[in-house]
Image (spheres, rainbow, N blue to C red):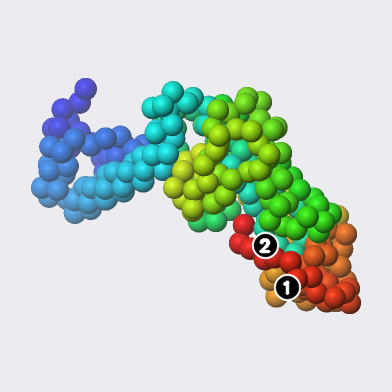
Amino acid sequence: MATIEEILRLPLSELKSKFIDQGQVAPARLLDALEADGRRGVRDLAARVRLKQRQNRSESTRLRRMLENEVSLWAQGIGLIAGVDEAGVGPMAGPVVAGAVVLPHDYRLRELDDSKRLDETTRDRLAVQIKSDSIAWAIGISEVEEIDKINIYRAGLLAMRRAVEALAVRPEFILVDARTIPECGIPQKGIIRGDQKSASIAAASIIAKTTRDAMMMELDLKYPGYGLAEHKGYATPAHFLALRELGALPIHRRSYRPVREVLGLEPVQAALFGDG
C-alpha cells in the first residue's frame, strides 16, 4: 500500500481519478495533507473529496432509513418481502401498470427513490439494476377497458394484485404504497408515501413507471401524431390539442372527462384523476 508521501507525489489527474472518479476512500491524514499542499488544484481536489464523503454519508443514511420497514420484518423472521406500487393513475390514455419487487436482505442501491423524483435516464438505469439484483420482480396490468368498467382506483388495485401473483416466488409479506390490496391473501401493510419510505416500494415504483413508459412509446408508433412518447398519456396541453383535433383513440379512457367531452358523452361522476 502506498504511503501518504507517495500518494502526494502522484499527478493531480491521477489523484482525481482515484478519489473522485473511482471513489476510493481517502484517509483523514491524506486529506489533511492534500489541504496543506502548496498546489491550488490539489487543495481544490481535497475540498471535492470532502464534499463527496459528506454526500456519501447522507446517501447512506437515507438508504438505511428506507429499509426500516423491511429490517423490522426481517427481524421477525419474515424473509421474502414484496414492495408493490403502480404507475398511470392520472393519464387520459393507456393502461395502469403495477410493479412488484422482492429485494435481497439489506439491499442498498444508490439513488433508489420514488420514481417520480428521478429523471428518465436514472429511472431506466436503476430499473435494469433492480431487475438484475432482485430475488423476483413482476408487473401487472389493467387495461383501459377495465379502468372504464371498474374505475381507476379499483383497476390500480387489480394491477397490483396481478403483479404479486406474477412473482416467481410467493412473498411472505407485502409493503404497498398508501393502500392495501384486496383479495390478496398475504399479510400486508400500506405505507403513506411508501415509495419514499420503503426501498422495496421505491423499486416497485421504478419497475412500474419504466414499464408503462416503454408501453406508451410503443403505442406512439402505433398511433402517431398524439405525442404519446412525450407525455405518456398524461393530460398535457399538447395531448388536449391532439385529442380535440384528431379525436379519441381506443386507448383513451372513456371514463375521463376530457375524453368524454370529445366524444360528446355525459360526464361520469366517478371519473378520477391522480398522479400515479
Q: Secondary structure at mark 1?
A: helix
Q: Quadrant of residue 128?
A: top right
Left or right placement of residue 38 versus residue 112 in this view: left
Q: Which residue lies at the image location 63% right of the left edge and 63% below the top edge? A: 274
Q: Quadrant of residue 102?
A: top right
> Is residue 1 visible in the rendered structure shown here?
yes
Left or right placement of residue 22 versus residue 236 in this view: left
Label 2, on which residue? 90
Q: Which residue lies at the image location 23% right of the left edge and 47% below the top edge? A: 50
Where's residue 16, x and y in %? 30, 43
Residue type highlighted by circle 2? Gly
Left or right placement of residue 132 versus residue 40 in this view: right
Residue 150 position (above or below residue 8): below
Where's residue 131, x and y in %? 59, 34
Left or right placement of residue 47 versus residue 74 in this view: left
Label 1, on which residue? 238
User: How many numbered marks does the figure carry?
Assistant: 2
Q: Nearer the viewer, residue 52 or 33?
A: 52
